[in-house]
Image: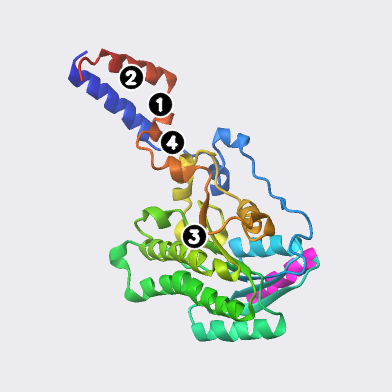
Amino acid sequence: MSALSRNLVVLKILEKVMKPLPCTGSSVRQCSSSEEHAKFFPPELSPMLPAGTFKNKTAFLTGGGTGLGRGMAQFLSHLGARVIIASRKLPVLEQTAKEISQETGNKVIPLAMDVRDPNVVKATFDRVEQEFGLPNIIINNAAGNFVSPSERLSPNAWKTVVDIVLNGTAFVTLDVGKRLIKEGKGAVFLNISTDYAETGSGFVAPSSAAKAGVETLTKSLNAEWSRYGMRFNCISPGPIRTKGAFDRLDPGGKFIREFTKRIPAGRTGEVAELCNLAVYLVSDYSNWISGQIIRINGGEFPSGSGMFNPLKQVTKEQWDVMEAMIRSVKGS
């Protein structure tokens, strides 16, 4: 076989390997979990920590009305915490607080707060400190994101995302942190990031830049404020299905169907899986963990960086052909 013929065969094989596989199933949910080997990695949805883990502790969450925030609030309440959830949409918070309280028997307090406004943040923590005392746990989960070509971004679009994600996290953390220092009280902070904060990503440039800032803030305050009894960690999740996020980032569902094939675990994540990691990181069981960016992504992040990882789709027969061609190459 000539060198040209060998190259043509390899190109045909790689073209087939790199071609997206057809998606079967009538819904995004079916397709996103349709990889056969996902059966080896079933999600565990129940809380892993013992009941009463957070008894006599108060947790403050931003963006706690829906999605990941609601899930974390639910887990913390199940485990005994008094939970305060804060965001701009008070009716949503009130409904969430009512439902979680009825389910767990523990108090969930809804507070309207726009993290983008430091004066509103200050007023909120004035009330929290007066009525409930300073929180032991602070989770910065409020987020804003949408996909867009960067050339279509207006200054206001950029500012909106950065104000919510980076500035909002900073305003909340600095305000309550100063109060904790003044009172001589420790606390644990958890920030929610994303994997592309490290690599960057097209079409979500404002979120990518803001989340990178959140991760740097996490590591910076770990170095500076540990002496005051505070811990700081960050969770960097891969694709976890929540209605609000996926409606804005993948309204048609096509992207996640293709993306799931890149995940070594063969499926997207569940909210409860992130919640179990989150409650562990804000518990006393993780007191020697601080300043860390912890990934939960089914193995997708490291797998995505390997140039030849797509070759996992090559069949045994195709490998036989390729191996014969490789062995026939002479010289360096």
Secondary structure, mark 4, is loop
Q: Are marks 2 and 1 in contact (CB under 8 Å)?
A: yes
Query: In which quadrant of the rendered view does residue 331 lie?
Result: top left
Amino acid beneath label 4 = Leu
Amino acid beneath label 1 = Val
Q: What segment carries the magenta color?
A: 91-104
Q: Say whether residue 1 is left or right of residue 124.
A: left
**Closer to the eye: label 4 or 2:** 2
Disc 4 target residue: 21
Distance CA(mark 3)–CA(mark 1): 34 Å
Q: Is residue 7 above or below residue 210?
A: above
Viewer-proximal residue, 14 or 183? 183
Distance CA(mark 2)–CA(mark 3): 41 Å
Which quarter of the rendered picture does the N terminus lie within?
Answer: top left
Mark 2, residues whose alpha carbon is within 10 Å: few (<14), some, or many (≥20)? Answer: some
Query: In which quadrant of the rendered view does residue 305 lie?
Result: top left
The main secondary structure of the magenta stretch is helix
Residue 154 image offset from top left, x and y in percent: 32, 73
Which residue is drawn at the image coordinates 64% and 55% (left, top)?
Answer: 286
- What label does residue 314 carry, if any? 1
Confirm whether residue 303 shows in the render: yes
Distance CA(mark 1)–CA(mark 4): 12 Å
Distance CA(mark 4)–CA(mark 3): 30 Å
Residue 233 image offset from top left, x and y in percent: 54, 60
Which residue is drawn at the image coordinates 63% and 70% (left, top)?
Answer: 186
Secondary structure, mark 3, is loop
Q: Are marks 1 and 4 in contact (CB under 8 Å)?
A: no
**Closer to the eye: label 4 or 3:** 3
